[in-house]
Every structure is written in structure tokens, then in C-alpha cells.
Image (tube, rainbow, N blue to C red):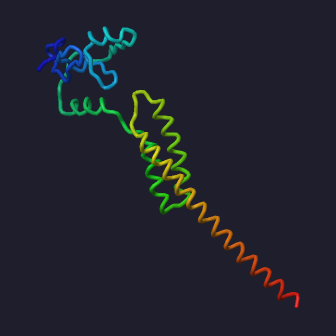
Amino acid sequence: MNCFFHEDIIACDQCSACGKKICHLCREEVDSKVFCKECFEKKFPLIQEKDDNVPEKNIESSQTKQQNQFSSQKKYNDLAIVSFSLSVASIFFHVIGAIPAIVTGVIARNQIKKSDPPQKGDEFALAGIIIGSIFLAMWSTVICIYVSMYGSFVLTMCTAFLAGVGD
């Protein structure tokens, strides 16, 4: 089926307002809804973009179809995935993995809130922060217990040594 406005171009979408078949040149997307140029201009008169660099002819190939499919999907924030991965890795890398997991998670959440177009991954960033915080608290407690036990052992040995020297 060809585009309603460009008869020589294959339609890749359908307007959610009027139902006309439209090509990539006529397509406008707002909040994951697709509109033709006419409906877009009626519904959103202040938000208009024109791209003069887009060619008028469309050669529909499988690569173009894949690009159109992936360009309309939201992408995951890379730091959110890194945060989650580091938090899970902190099981083995202890505090060295937990601290970067928390830091990258906070940065990722800020990037996701400010991103345009919106990104996915807020749940990964939040999980990275929570898991990283849990492991940071756990490993910090283990280290404190170890240091206090080792410190009392050293103190006992020094006291015993000094008591033996005085005799």
C-alpha cells in the first residue's frame, strides 16, 4: 500500500487520528502515537519540524524497514545497565563494585529524566542503586567487624608482649 500523500512511496505507518496510510516523510510521532502531517499540524500547531534534507523518493529495503522499526523504539540508558551489572558484580568485587554501581545508577536516573526522546532503564538504575547500597552496607559491616577483631587481637598480643618484657 502506498502513502496517501506520496503515491510513489510505500506506506510504513498509519495515522492514529485519521487512519490514512503514510510514509516516513509524512510521519510525526508524539507520545508513541503516529500522526500524518495534517493531523499533527492540527493537534500540535506550535510543534512543527521540517527536514529539507530528506529525499523525496523512498527505496524500501529490509535495512530501511529495520531502521524505521528501531528508531521508533525507546532505547535503554547505557549507564543504567552498567549500574545494574556492577551491583550484581559487587557480590564478587565487594565495595569496589558497589560504589560505582551507586554512582552510575544516580547518574543514569538523572540522564533518563532529562533525556529527549525518553529512554528506558530507570528500573535498572534504581535496582543498581538499591543492590549496590545493600552490598556496600554489608561489606562495610564485614570490614568493620574484621578490623575490630584484628585490632583487638593485635592489642592483646602487644599487651602480652609488653607484660612479658617487664619481667
Towards the viewer: 93 or 158: 158
Where is residue 84? Give x, y as percent: 44, 49
Towards the viewer: 69 or 41: 41
Towards the viewer: 100 or 113: 113
Where is residue 36? Give x, y as percent: 25, 15
Where is residue 113? Give x, y as percent: 47, 32
Residue at 56% across / 56% down in the picture?
A: 136
Towards the viewer: 68 or 80: 80
In the image, taking residue 49 as reference, residue 156 lies left or right, namely right
Which image quadrant: the C terminus? bottom right
Residue at 36% across / 12% down in the picture?
A: 48
Relative height, residue 153 to residue 53 (above, below): below
Which image quadrant: the N terminus? top left
Image quarter of residue 117: top left
Image quarter of residue 154: bottom right
In the image, taking residue 40 as reference, residue 115 lies left or right, namely right
Residue at 50% across / 44% down in the picture?
A: 105
In the image, taking residue 154 as reference, residue 80 lies left or right, namely left
Residue at 40% across / 34% down in the picture?
A: 119
Question: Residue farthest to the bottom?
Answer: 167
Relative height, residue 144 to residue 119 (above, below): below
Image quarter of residue 41: top left
Where is residue 101? Give x, y as percent: 51, 50
Q: How many marks?
A: 0
In the image, taking residue 114 as reference, residue 34 lies left or right, namely left
Relative height, residue 130 to residue 37 (above, below): below
Question: Residue farthest to the left?
Answer: 1
